C-alpha cells in the first residue's frame, strides 16, 4: 500500500497529494482524492462532501497527504486539522519516501 501512496505523491509532485487509507473487511487500501487547496504546492484540502461520502461507506483509517521536498513532520496546520476531524494523518515525504503518523 505504501508504494501506491508514494506513486501518487510522485505523480502529483510538486503539489501535495491527498487521499484516504480505507479499511474494509480488515483490508486496507489507499484512495487518492482531489486536492482542492488554492495553493496545492503548500497545502492540501479535501472537499468536505468527499470526506463525508467516504465516512458513510467505509472506515477511514488515515487521512493521507504528501510533503514535496520537505520532511514528513506535521505542520501546525496538520496538527490542528487532524485534531479537528479526529482521524489520524499519514504524512509522507517525497522524494525521500518517509512517513509519519499523527494522532488526533
Image (cartoon, grey):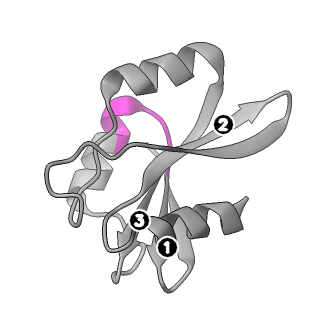
Q: Is residue 58 above or below residue 68?
A: above
Question: Considering the numbered disc 2 on the image, is that residue within a helix, a strand or a loop?
Answer: strand
For residue 46: magenta?
no
Any mark on residue 22, and which? 2
Residue at the image point whose x is 72% and y is 44% from the top: 29
Residue at the image point whose x is 34% and y is 81% from the top:
70
Q: Residues within 10 Å of mark 3 (few under 14, many from 20)?
A: some
Quadrant assignment, res 74: bottom left
| Quadrant including the N terminus | bottom right
* Residue under numbered circle 3: 12
Q: CA distance from mark 3 to mark 1?
A: 6 Å
The circle on residue 38 is: none
**Image x and y of residue 67, in percent:** 37, 70
Q: For the residues marked 1 and 2, what is the alpha-carbon distance in whole angstroms?
A: 21 Å
Q: Which percent across, then down, holds residue 18?
A: 43, 51
- Per the image, the residue denoted by label 1 is 10
- Decide which of tag 2 and tag 3 comes sooner along the chain: 3
Secondary element under disc 1, as helix, strand or loop, is helix
Q: Look at the picture and state if 21 lies above or below 16.
A: above
Q: Residue furthest top?
A: 56
Quarter-wise, where is residue 69 in the image? bottom left
Front-lying residue, 65 or 8: 8
Please provide percent x and percent y for residue 36: 26, 42
Verify CB contact (< 8 Å) between mark 1 and mark 2.
no
Cα separation between marks 2 and 3:
20 Å
Q: Is residue 83 magenta?
A: yes
Secondary element type, mark 3: helix
Residue 96, relative to residue 102: is it above or below? below
Q: Which residues are magenta?
A: 82-89
Q: Is residue 21 left or right of residue 53?
A: right
Seen from the viewer's position, the closer of residues 82 and 35 is 35
Amino acid at each position: 500500500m505504501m508504494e501506491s501512496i508514494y506513486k501518487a505523491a510522485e505523480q502529483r509532485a510538486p503539489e501535495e497529494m491527498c487521499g484516504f487509507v480505507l479499511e474494509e473487511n480488515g483490508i486496507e487500501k489507499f484512495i487518492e482524492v482531489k486536492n482542492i487547496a488554492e495553493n496545492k504546492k503548500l497545502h492540501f484540502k479535501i472537499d468536505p462532501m468527499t470526506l463525508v461520502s467516504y465516512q458513510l461507506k467505509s472506515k477511514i483509517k488515515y487521512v493521507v497527504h504528501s510533503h514535496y521536498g520537505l520532511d514528513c513532520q506535521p505542520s501546525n496546520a496538520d496538527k490542528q486539522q487532524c485534531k479537528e476531524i479526529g482521524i489520524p494523518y499519514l504524512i509522507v515525504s517525497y522524494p525521500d519516501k518517509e512517513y509519519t503518523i499523527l494522532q488526533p
